[in-house]
Amino acid sequence: MRLQPPQREPGKSLVWGIFPQAAPSLLKDLPIFLGAFSVFYAFLAVTRYWLSPVNSQTEIDLRRGALPAYAMFSVMRIAIAYVISLVFSIVYGYVAAYNAKAERVMIPLLDTLQSIPVLSFLPGVMLAMVALFPSRQFGIELGAILLIFSGQAWNMTFSFYASLKSIPREMHEVAEVYRWSPWQRLVQMELPFAAIGLVWNSMISVASAWFYLIACEMFVLGKRDFRLPGLGSYLQAAANASDARAIVWGLIAMIGVIVAMDQLVWRPIIAWAEKFKFEEVEGARHQRSPALDLLRSSRVLPLMGRIFIGPVRERLSLHFARKWAQRREDYRPSQPTRWVGYTIGAAVSLGIAYAVVKMSGLAALVTRSELRSIFVGGGATFLRVEFTLLIAALWTIPAGVAIGLNAKLSAAIQPIVQVVASVPATALFPIIVLLLTRIGGGLAVGSIVLMLLGTQWYILFNVIAGASALPTDLKEVCGVFQFGRWARWRELILPGIFPYLITGFVTASGGAWNASILAEYFHLNGQTFSTTGLGAVVSDAANTGNYPVLLIATMLMALIVLTINRLVWRRLYTLASTRFKLET
């Protein structure tokens, strides 16, 4: 019997006739290959630049042709800072959630650190990184990435911590029955349960990174120039040169990058994270993403998963399971381990005692009138922060619930919210100050507006995450029993979003204290606008070099934040982890 050559249909290639599925598969995987190649090329280009010698002064090219390269540099800095923030959030949140002794220190410390303005320690970080890497651009880049990280990590950490505290009791019981190792708990239970909250808080973290990007990429200290090529430095250089056309093109490029990230990154991740909802029935509506559909239709990615990712995951699971079983049977706390802990504790105590002695000497130099202005400013900023949170809650809670419960509305509104949240509040503040100066109100009202612009998104994104995570079966029960609008809010929505809402309030409160440094003391056109507040005291003391006042004001801010955390946020977190758990 002779083999007949394959017959080719008109308009189809020979490859199509022999392998009828090959051509469609290659066409579907082509965009994936191009995207992977683009990311790899960008990584090589950025790495080569980082390893180059430090330039004496980086000139920012204001031509439109430079924008693609600048956008690539900025996105890479934000992406690397985000990866560091994600790892930090998982490790820090895990330890704080499962170690009661550490929790009493770590959560108030986290709340205090997020309240410290990033711009206040920008010079120190940059100088330290340049000293560590004096001959390479890597030092300046690492300093910028660490500062972006310090503006991203806090709300993600609080979100993961709150999710771990809210895991239902029966899920922990299942993990105990099957004797899961900590690795298995993390991969199979804790990360999936926290996925929705982490995704939405990741979005607001990346959005807030654009604010810090401008400060980090355009940093000049005295005669030392630490400018970096990027969209932030491009916009700042265009503003300094009063080049309106360059400003417009820079904003178009930034908005284009934000929209592209929303469509290619966040929209697919949100649609993918819906499978981790804690519910017993499948929802009627799902988030759709063309990019996710393209990835799911790929034939190369599942093959790579079976060849590379699957075996590695299995080996890790077996390794940690065996280690955990052996530790449960044989582990005994050793005496050297205890002594190491005692030694570290003693060293920390001595360091704190030394710092207290030194600070006491500086505090003694503060006069009575300065002390009075510090405490009056602390009270004014406290009231301003709480009023800002109240205003933000009045519109973000209903808006966030509406967006989170409606997939179509979420798909339409999400890119707009991403763009608006990514616009630095300080870019709009000069317009607000000038407007309020003309119509009345001045900085007393303008400071609240700036705080609101910088903090309301934390509450909105967390409310959206909480509403998106509401189980479909509970929503159907409300429909079956014909709950009214108020009954639905009282019995389902508010209890369901409560843990996410507390996370939003905690991070928004820290952001408001952080923003008070700029909101209460502002320079514009050679004039200084200020209002009564602790942020104004800190800014004025920093500008005049009054370090005793700066120390006492910073200590008072930390004390207020710690007190609020102890009396309010900690109790609300306890309430969220006990009364408002989704348990059967």
Image (tube, rainbow, N blue to C red):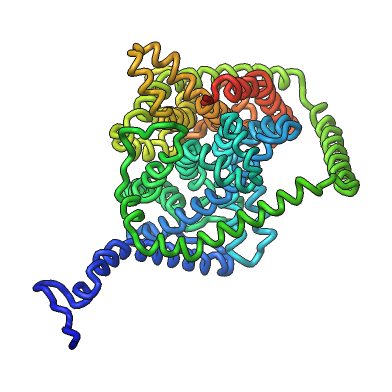
Q: Measured along the vertical axis of the image, is residue 57 above or below residue 381?
A: below
Question: Residue extending furthest left?
Answer: 10
Q: Is residue 304 visible?
A: yes
Residue drawn at the location 75% of the way across and 51% of the way down: 326
Image location of residue 40, percent across then percent down: 45, 65
Left or right, 169 with reference to 367 = left
Res 345 → quadrant: top right
In this rendering, the answer to whether 1 lies above or below 490 is below
Compared with 554, 222 (above or below) is below
At horizontal 58% and vertical 30% (from top left) the residue drawn is 170
Residue positioned most to the bottom: 2
- Is residue 166 in view from this perspective? no
Quadrant of the image occupied by residue 356:
top right
Q: Could you tell me residue 113's position as x and y percent?
A: 65, 36
* Residue at 18% from the left image edge and 87% from the top image edge: 1
Front-most of 140 and 172?
A: 172
Residue 32 percent coordinates (x, y): 35, 61
